[in-house]
Amino acid sequence: MKAKSRKNHARSSEKMTQLSKNSLVEGDCVAGLNSLPEGSIDLVFADPPFNIGYGYDVYHDRREADDYLAWSEAWIRAVHRVLKPSGTFWLAIGDEFAAELKVAAHRAIGFHLRSWVIWYYTFGVNCKKKFSRSHAHLFYFVKDAKNFTFNDDQIRVPSARQLVYADARANPSGRLPDDTWILRPHDVPDGFSADQDTWYVPRVCGTFKERAGWHGCQMPEQLLGRIIRLCSNPGDVVLDPFSGSGTTLVTAKKLDRRYFGFELSPDYAEQARKRLQETNIGDKLSGVENPFMTQHKVRKSGAGKGKKTARRT
């Protein structure tokens, strides 16, 4: 083996060894992703800066639009390279650049879009001159449209036949989620549930026990738990290019996945590592798994008296 080849082989082995360990690395995610072995990651969840002027400690969140889009395409390309052929990529993004990033990921880079999920949350920012925002976009991409992890047994939910009618014909395993749009959950209380593609999960606010307290943008563990259970298996590698408060990595650890993250801010990285040190495999995820509760009152088929009440919790 030539000296140069030996050196490259040694570097590749070092990178694979690095990936075998749970890690949170300080630094730029584009350079970091491009330093990892190609096809080495099972699942990537990314919640990047939305380019709306948020006050991060070391990142400037107000780029020119073209600059932001070019940077976004660079890191999404790096994600595509590092994912295994069967890998999955989830992207959380706001309204401002959702359409552009969807097109870039799908048409320019080559990801296949499986679902465009809307996350509806409470405690959104109150607006005076327009409708208050209470949602974010969650794009569910795969690298290969026919080869990916989809643990449907992890996301099946009770059907209406089970919950409301106690119908013996109902599949005891529940049903797969719908693909449904809802205006607002509290406007259509009987039409909204956490199994549809508009997900009701409360945002992590400053007064919530789950909140880390030192980072303003924090995803709920229950939301991340659904994604990680669905799109990876125990022992798989879950990567977050924008680790922030570390919630993706914390959730991955709780669910017995290996984790790897990048974080530009030394302070955020230090605080996230403390959270990870306090987390154990098998710990319960923070938050309520099904926070939206409904009551249905229906008359039993063929019954002339009384009503049956089914309560979903």
Image (cartoon, grey):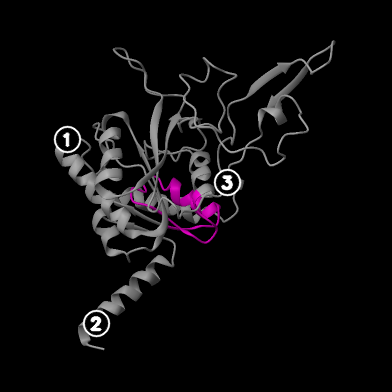
- Contact between marks 1 and 3 (CB within 8 A): the answer is no
- Residue for badge 3: 152
Mark found first going from the N terminus, 2 or 1 = 2
Report how far apart the C-alphas of labels 2 and 3 lie in the structure: 43 Å
Q: Nearer the viewer, residue 313 or 188?
A: 188
Residue 292 drawn at (x, y percent): 58, 26
Q: Is residue 28 visible?
A: no
Q: Nearer the viewer, residue 302 or 218?
A: 302
Quadrant in which the C terminus is drawn: top right
Residue range corresponding to the magenta coloring: 231-259
In this rendering, the answer to whether 136 lies above or below 9 is above
- Residue for badge 2: 5
Residue 307, by quadrant, is top right
Mark found first going from the N terminus, 2 or 3 = 2
Amino acid at pointer 2: Ser
Q: Secondary structure at mark 3?
A: helix
- Residue for badge 1: 65
